[in-house]
Amino acid sequence: MLQLTWTTEAPTPVGDQLLAVAMRDAPSPDTFDARFGKPVREAATAARFTGKHGETFSFTRVDGEVFERVVLMGAADLADPSQLRSFAHDAVRLAQSAGVARLVIDLRATLAGAMPWAGGDPAAVARAGDLLAQGCELGSYAYERFIAEDKRARRSVREVVFVADDTGPAEGTARGQIIAKSVARARDLVNGPAGLVTPTFLATTASNIVASLQDEHEVAITVLDRDECLARNMGCFLGVAQGSDEPPKFIHMSYKPHGPSKGRVCLIGKGVTFDSGGYSLKPTDGMLDMKMDMAGAAAVIAAFEGAAKLHLPWEVHAIVAATENMVSGRAYRLGDVLVASNDKTVEINNTDAEGRLTLADAMVYASKLQPTMMLDFATLTGACMVALGPKIAGVMSKDDRLAEDWLGAAARVGEAMWRLPLPDDLKEQLKSKLADLKNTGERYGGAITAGLFLSEFAEGCRWLHCDIAGPAMASKPYGVTTVGGSGFPVATILEFLT
Ligand code: BES
Ligand code: MN
Ligand code: ZN
């Protein structure tokens, strides 16, 4: 973790630092020249530096005995939470590649222009500090477990000093660091290859998290093995699991706040640690990234840890039915009928629609806890990516209030989500002659019919479904997201519960 501090006075420059100056506009003669001189302003103008997000202009200067590296950074859109976070991320990246130990980020109005949170309510000011802290911490993220030590990225930065007219955002620092840690944890789980991150590995990780929280928090964990799931009639989950040699694990973590609780929330994550498609086998291109099919599980396990560390005022349950979806002489077949733990029968017309089967039993289990609400997170359908692209999650709920609250939280932390409808008439597509339901409908509306399938297992609970097939993993970097697992939507979960 970095040491993050806020101050109103710029610290005395040292050689081993980078000064990043936030600029919401092109440098102006009356404020800029006195500090850095006219030639620098003219050079920056010639280089067309205008203060747009993503623009940088670097120079060095000698101030007495000290050699100082300076970078002007475009900061025009810091009112947008995702830009605010990525601004800090980009600054840390620049400092890491400069190899310095200290980064000073100057946000003072004299050069930068007034910050968008200035004069805002304390919660909004603290959130700015939270997002900047998240960005700083994520600026050093890389998954390097399988990279030789001497080939790993250089991490010289130890300290970030924010210089600002108001140190109010410092209130959000610790929170932002906890959130970033959870995001990084989720990313690590997604980035880990399926040979490492097995259902057993997920269960061990969850147990280790609970053990590490045990001293200071009221937390517990139950892990059910195959036989225990069988005793609970989880026929849909076990149907998917039966083709794999990796033992399935049903993971249930719980946390109770010390003070009064606002209610009980179940967070359910799809935990398919590898999705080959089963007998409805995926082609190579479609299977290539399917170690990421447990990103929902990664998010709820990581968010659980964050929720406890932040002492959030809800009883939180993280629930994951973890398994692989494989091909073998024991694997489930097309045409099989599986019986879920609420006795609903499901005819399998595509073994690649396995996520909804694992979630069905997880949702029935969650509903028995009589939660105030349950939310599920799943890399569920390619169709959702077709609809919304690679960066936006699809949100489905019959509860308008819940959907609005959720989307509000997502907007405050800058995670992109869009609501899709759950029209009852499309349930027609899931009708089976042999059973209560088929597991897939037709091609068009695939994200929605998956949501409608899940709605059959919400058992009268307030429920929201979030299809993260797109944003769970990135093939190109954007914002604070590096290639690979993104940690989406850990930040929204924690904001929502706050
Ligand atoms: N895990 C996949 C969905 C997925 C696809 C996530 C691409 C991320 C990227 C899911 O299990 C799946 O295979 N869904 C099928 C459903 C279909 C058979 C109705 C799909 O999207 O093709
Ligand atoms: Mn699948
Ligand atoms: Zn899947």
Image (spheres, grey):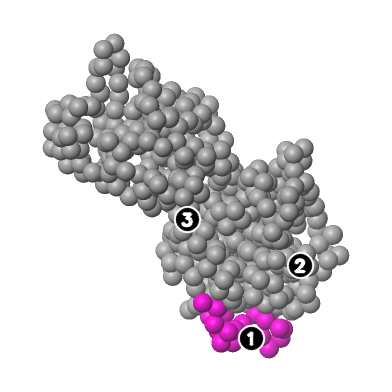
Chain-order first, disc 3 or disc 2: 2
**Range shown magenta:** 421-442
Residue 112 covered by magenta stretch: no
What kind of residue is marked 2?
Gln
Q: Which residue is mark 1?
A: 431
Check residue 365 in the rendering and tell me which mark sits there, or answer none. none
Q: Is residue 10 visible?
A: yes
**How many residues crowd around disc 3 within 10 Å: few (fewer than 14), some, or many (20 or more)?**
some
Could you tell me which quadrant the N terminus lies in?
Answer: top right
Dot 3: element: helix
Query: Of tags 1 and 3, which is closer to the observer?
Result: 3
**Cα distance, mark 3 to mark 2?**
29 Å
Q: Nearer the viewer, residue 435 or 341?
A: 341
Q: Nearer the viewer, residue 353 or 287?
A: 353
**Cα distance, mark 1 to mark 3?**
39 Å
The residue at 71%/61% (across/down) is: 263
Q: Which residue is mark 2?
A: 370
**Cα distance, mark 1 to mark 2?**
28 Å
For the residues labelled 3 and 2, say whether their Cβ atoms are less than 8 Å apart. no
Dot 1: element: loop
**How many residues crowd around disc 1 within 10 Å: few (fewer than 14), some, or many (20 or more)?**
some
Q: Which residue is mark 3?
A: 412
Q: Nearer the viewer, residue 412 or 193?
A: 412
What kind of residue is marked 1?
Lys
